[in-house]
Image (cartoon, grey):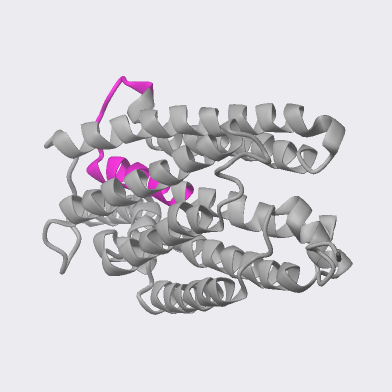
Amino acid sequence: MPRGDVFLNDGQNKAMFLFHYIPNKPLAYTALAVYALFTIYLTFRVYRSKSPKFLYILAFTGLMETIGYVVRIICANFTDLGRYIGTTLFILLAPNALALVNYKAVGEIIRLSNVETDKFYLRTKFVTWFFFGSDIFSFVLQGAGGGMQTITRLNNVGIAITLVGLGTQLFFFAAFAGITVYVHRRPEYNYHVEGSPNAKRNLVYCLYVTIALLYIRSIYRVAEYATGYSGPIARLEWAFYVFDSLIIAISFLVYSVFFIGSYLPKHDVVQSFEDKVSVSPSSSTENDGRDVELNKY
């Protein structure tokens, strides 16, 4: 009797070993098309609307997801360790950059509100860069752990390191969610955007939904790695598409419908304001000089 894997080529056998299934190409093609469309749309919208430039992170994340699914499609035909690591890193790590968009958005609310505070955790740079730094730390742990899991003798260590990275991300993301709620509920944190009434409220609603979605995705990843590289969750491709791919696609949809750039000043307006501020001291000096000259007469 022939073995059940006799019809699989060597690359497909490696796919069974690394993925625990052969990646479904129709689903991968669908995800590829969806993320490619989001990438094109968000790139165009950020550019056309002259929105703050940090929103290009959305388009960049979509591009990384697109590349990840291209590699996943290739893996359906032939898988090796390099391709597996590539698709894993692109799809696992890239969406974490969406959190940076949220950090920066809350930082912008704080900056535009111009509220004096002695609380270090309510300062713009802290909200943006501290949480971004915590994400980088968790990225490094997840990336290192994901790579180690492909080496049999380091598999358990890799799982542990990945779990620490995911746990760190969950903890700091929950802390960030708490700051977002605080800024939302405090009336002194408010600002005005021409042509966009209730800008803060709409922006915060976008953040709430995407924070919840990203948190669900992180919990899924924790459960996946906690049950092991060969565990029941890791073997379910549908779970990956529901709790990772679909969750991130819905997040992109929310970012597109409740476009953050509509609730923040345009970057050319901000630049114009900064230019006026930088010019005003010299202008006032010149005016003072003219007043002195006039007074002589």
Closer to the camera in the image, 165 or 136: 165
Instruction: Point out the residue furthest to the top here.
Output: 118
Q: Is residue 157 above or below residue 280?
A: above
Q: Is residue 168 above or below residue 8?
A: above
Q: Is residue 253 above or below residue 111?
A: below
Residue 187 locus on image (x, y percent): 11, 37
Range of residues picked out in magenta: 100-120
Residue at left offset 38%, top offset 56%: 274
Left or right of 205, for residue 222: right
Secondary structure mostly seen in magenta is helix
- State the quadrant of the C terminus: bottom left
Residue 241 locus on image (x, y percent): 49, 59
Closer to the camera in the image, 130 or 153: 153
Residue 13 locus on image (x, y percent): 81, 61
Tell me where residue 247 sits by quadrant. Answer: bottom left
Closer to the camera in the image, 162 or 1: 1
Residue at left offset 27%, top offset 54%: 206
Instruction: Point out the residue furthest to the front here.
Output: 1
Left or right of 160, for residue 220: left
